[in-house]
Image (cartoon, rainbow, N blue to C red):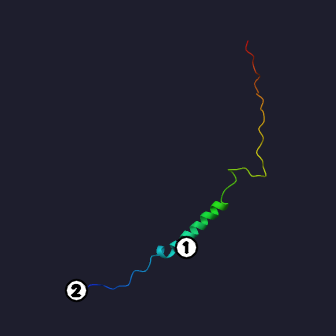
Amino acid sequence: MGVKYVLSEPLPPSWWAKNKAVVAAVAGLALGLYLAGGCDDTATPSPNHPSPAPSITQSRTPATKEH
């Protein structure tokens, strides 16, 4: 009669299997910090410096009248 079952030790978990929760937590924390404080102020003006008000500009060339 042949051998029905072979008992052996299972392979230990890989590095990724052991540490994927830690990697995901660190990546999520880094992404959250980037989104919370990593934005620059070039897209929107700061509240301390209002945008300039529109003004009327005069034409530099004199207007000509057609007869």
Q: Which element type, helix, strand or loop, lies under badge 2?
A: loop
Please give the name of the residue rendered at 78% of the width and 47% of the height, measured from the top-left corner: 50
- State the quadrant of the C terminus: top right
Q: Is residue 55 left or right of residue 12?
A: right
Please give the name of the residue rendered at 63% of the width and 62% of the height, measured from the top-left corner: 34
Query: Which of marks 1 and 2 precedes in the sequence?
Result: 2
Residue that extends furthest to the top in the rendered view of this protein: 67
Report the number of numbered marks. 2
Decide: is 5 above or below 30. below
The picture quadrant where one finds residue 5 is bottom left
Badge 1 amino acid:
Val
Question: Residue 36, position in %: x, y?
Answer: 66, 61
Kindly report which numbered mark, 2 or 1, lies closer to the viewer in this rendering: 2
Q: Which mark is residue 22?
A: 1
Question: Residue 60, position in %: x, y?
Answer: 76, 27
The foreground one among 40 and 25 is: 25
Which residue is denoted by mark 2 in the rendering? 2
